[in-house]
Amino acid sequence: MKRFTRRSITPLGALGRGLLAGAIGAGIQTLFFKATRRIAPETPKSAFTPPESKQAGEMATETVARRFVEGFAQRGPLGDEAKRRGGEIVHFGFGAAWGGLYGLARESLPSLRGLPGALGFATLVWMVGDNLILTAFRLSAPPTAYPVKTHAYAFSAHLPYAFGAELAYEALRAPSWVEAGIALWALQRKLRARRLPSPMRTAADWVIDRVAEGRRTAAETVLH
């Protein structure tokens, strides 16, 4: 049976790992928001005047989702639940996109690996995302409109994201996680095949092995 071997990671492999690591980091950041909801500083209502009446009561990610669906795709209107789910997709997509860039930079510049690189990554995403992109797309007021405690909380929220993405990316650099996942998939399928008559079970096992081999080859091609 073929096993993964360690090789230098290609840009495609770095991008794929980074996208997944970024999404994992976004999930960890969501947990941070939930855990700190009671102590999060309240944003002054007078700091930002939304250009659209619909933005009142929306999170920035929900506004992006609504603009995409109703404005770009010309569908909708979005209900509250669809808007909430759309906001989550935007949140994870944004985190994954930054993670992809981080993966490419991390493999190109080894000095970005580890805790110092994660700290710099958190600072970059906070500076560009919160203070430039949100303002440029009229999702928030300029940075000077918010008090220091608001910026401090926003920055602290990017630390679990960046460190989570860094740890996830480092784990994904090892080939063992792919091998373990494919092996578990094959074992589950073979256990189900035990219910079949003996000749059919032998054929099913052969098919499962071939599919698992194909998945190993495909995963190694993408991730390396």
Image: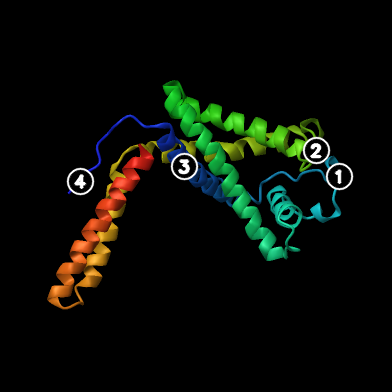
Identify the residue shown where x is 42% and y is 41%. 168
- Label 3: which residue? 21
Mark in the foreground, 1 or 3: 3
- Quadrant housing residue 88: bottom right
Mark in the foreground, 4 or 3: 4
Looking at marks 1 and 3 on the same chain, the residue that comes earlier in the sequence is marked by 3
Identify the residue shown where x is 34% and y is 46%. 219
Question: What's the residue type where badge 4 is placed?
Answer: Lys
Q: Would residue 147 be found to the left or right of residue 174 on screen? A: right
Looking at the rendered structure, the secondary structure element under dot 1 is loop
CA gap between label 2 and label 3 equals 30 Å
- Comparing 116 with 197, the one in front is 197
Looking at marks 1 and 4 on the same chain, the residue that comes earlier in the sequence is marked by 4
- Label 2: which residue? 141
Mark in the foreground, 1 or 4: 4
- Label 1: which residue? 49
Mark in the foreground, 2 or 4: 4
Q: Is residue 183 placed above or below 8 in the rendered structure?
A: below
- Label 4: which residue? 2
Residue 17 spot, x, y in % from top left: 43, 40
